[in-house]
Structure formats: C-alpha cells, structure tokens
Image (cartoon, rainbow, N blue to C red):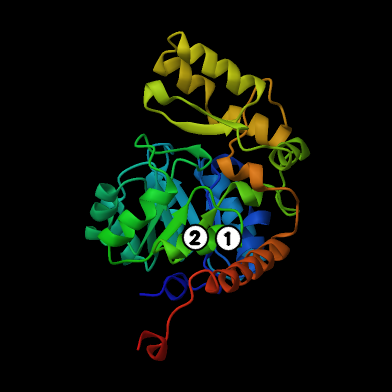
Amino acid sequence: MDLKKILGIDRPIIQGGMGNISNALLTSAVSNAGGLGTIGAGTRPPAEVERIIQETKARTDRPFALNIALSVSPHTKELMLLAEKYQIPVISLSAGNPVPYIPFLHQIGAKVMAVTGSVKHALKAEAAGADVIVAEGVEAAGINSPYESTTMVLIPQITDAVTIPVVAAGGIADGRGMLAAFSLGAQGVQLGTRFIATKEAPFASAYKERIVGAGDTSTIIIGRTLGRIRRVLDGPFAKRIAVKEKSGLSLEEYEKATTEMQHCLGALEGNEEDGFMNSGQIAGLIKDIPSVQELLDQIEAEYRTQLEKLAGVLPVKNQADRN
C-alpha cells in the first residue's frame, strides 16, 4: 500500500494539526505544494471549523485533512458531520480512541489516519480499519503520549508490527530527518514546528523568532507528573507552570493553565507572560523562514543529497564483488 496514493498527494509530507491556531492559509499552502495540509479542530466550535474548511476549499483543490483531537474537542460528533458534508478526504484522529469512529468515516469515503505513541494502540487502530498510522515520538510539539517513546525507537517497532503505511512524527524538519524516517520503515513524515517558521503561517512574529532562535535545549515538558505531557518553548509562563508542578500543582489547576486560550495567547499574540508556545525539540535545527513551497522543495533536495552521500558510506556489493 502506497501512502501517497492512499492520501492523494504528490509528496509524503503531512502538516500536523496545530489545534486552535490552525488556519486555512497554511493548510492550503501545504496542500498546494504537494503535501497534505491539515486543519486542526482543537476545541473550536463547529461553525468556526466549518468557516476554515470553506476557506481552505476556496484556496486549494488539492486533498487536505481534518484533525480531531478526540479527548480535547467537545464537538466530535458535529465535526464528523462536517467531514461528511464537505467530503473531506482524510481525517486524522488523535488524543483518544479512534476505533468507534472509523466505520462512519469509511462509510462517507474518508481515509483515516490514527495518531499513536505505542505499538499496542497502533495495532488496535489497524485492526479497526485505520488506513494510516501516524507514529509520534515525544520529541513532538504540544500534547504527547505519556509513554514518552522517541521517534527513533517507535517507528521501527510500529512498522514491524503493522502492515498499513506509517508516517513518522516528532523531531523531523528537513530532508535528513525524512530519509532517517524512511530508513526506519516509514512512508511519510508529519511536520508541525517546521511549518510554524514559514512565510504563510499567520502566527505572531515573536513565535517564529523564538523558533528560529531556539537551541537544542529550548523546549521543556510540562504535565509529566500529571500524565498530561506537553512540549513547549521554555518561556516565562511555561516555566511558572513547571515550577508549580514541582510543588504539587493539581490536575485541575494544570488544565486551567494549559487551555487553547493560553496556547493562542502565545502563538497568535506572542504573549509568553500569559500564554505558551508549543514547540518540538527540532526547533534548534530551524534557522530560516521560507515559503511552504520553498520548504518542501528544500526538504526533497536535502533528502536526495543525503541519500547520495550515504551511498558511499557502505557501498552495496554486486554479485561480481561477492564472488
């Protein structure tokens, strides 16, 4: 089974959902460049998600996805109906059990991507009929699996366990990362943080500058002691949450401090005193702000260049050499 054929895309590069900061401009840009753009529903009301779907369809005639974070959105049923109404070709299900929703999504003709952080959950999703597994390592931005498996160890274990295509997510931002993911058995990659620092991304300039100026230790994990892992940039607000967590922050207090409202304050307004900015560990590798088209072209070129370099590291012996 070929990932690109299943999703109807030219390049095996998928945009992460991004929750309430998701938008039509970036989504359509990724799809127009040959990848799979994604609208993240987050906690938005159905009417707002519908507006973004309409705008995205006006900007591109290419396939795009709708991400529904099942344990986050209070509007799952309504979002499923929107998927049917607008014949959205790909639905990404994350942060919850996708199994109950797969039959309906297949009935309306959608392909289903199930985001998971473990082999166990990948196998359950495949058994339920998922078309693609997105295996996400703890390097990724935002909400993460409590298992904290890294992409490097997660991808080969999941690709060994399932027969459907696997997309690698977490810690990937360039062609070298894509080649590494393919070497581990993945057929595609999902990028989130890398797309923040693009010209089309309508986020606060301060957010983009923080990504570009980040180092390898510029992100922190909050919520670990509460089973609510989230990776963010180490801004003032995020650091205060981390300090409070060490002194016994309750789950209720933590959830109030990490709503999509605080996420939007950081990402859309650049306010790190009252909000936070999601970011993956890969931020330390990002040093420029290209257009989405330029980025995807660059990733593909880097992939090919690195592949050629590796060909000389351990040359494949032909039959004459073996004899």
Picture residue at 52% right of the left edge, 67% below the top:
12
Classify residue 50 as left or right of residue 225.
right
Judged from this view, the residue extending furthest toward the top is: 247
Front residue of 100 and 212? 212
- Asked if one can make out residue 309 in the rendered structure from this viewpoint, the answer is yes
Which amino acid does the dot numbered 1 rest on?
Arg
Name the secondary structure under disc 1: helix
**Which label number is shown at residue 176?**
1
Q: Disc 2, disc 1: CB below 8 Å?
A: yes
Front residue of 51 and 17? 17
Which amino acid does the dot numbered 2 rest on?
Ala
> In which image quadrant can residue 295 be found?
bottom right
**Dot 2, how many residues are within 10 Å of its Cα: few (below 14), some (14-19), or many (20+)?**
some
Classify residue 61 as left or right of residue 147.
right
Classify residue 147 as left or right of residue 139.
left
Query: How far, Cα to Cα, is label 2 from label 1?
Result: 6 Å
Picture residue at 26% right of the left edge, 51% below the top:
99
Q: How many marks?
A: 2
Q: Quadrant of the N terminus?
A: bottom left
**Dot 1, how many residues are within 10 Å of its Cα: few (below 14), some (14-19), or many (20+)?**
some
Q: Is 230 rendered above or below residue 117?
A: above
- Asked if one can make out residue 114 in the rendered structure from this viewpoint, the answer is no
Front residue of 31 and 43? 31
Residue 137 percent location from the top left of the image:
43, 45
**Which label number is shown at residue 7?**
none
Residue 44 percent location from the top left of the image:
53, 40
Residue 210 percent location from the top left of the image:
72, 36
Residue ID for mark 2:
180
Classify residue 74 as left or right of residue 264.
left
Judged from this view, the residue extending furthest toward the front is: 323
Q: Is 25 rendered above or below residue 211?
A: below
Name the secondary structure under disc 2: helix
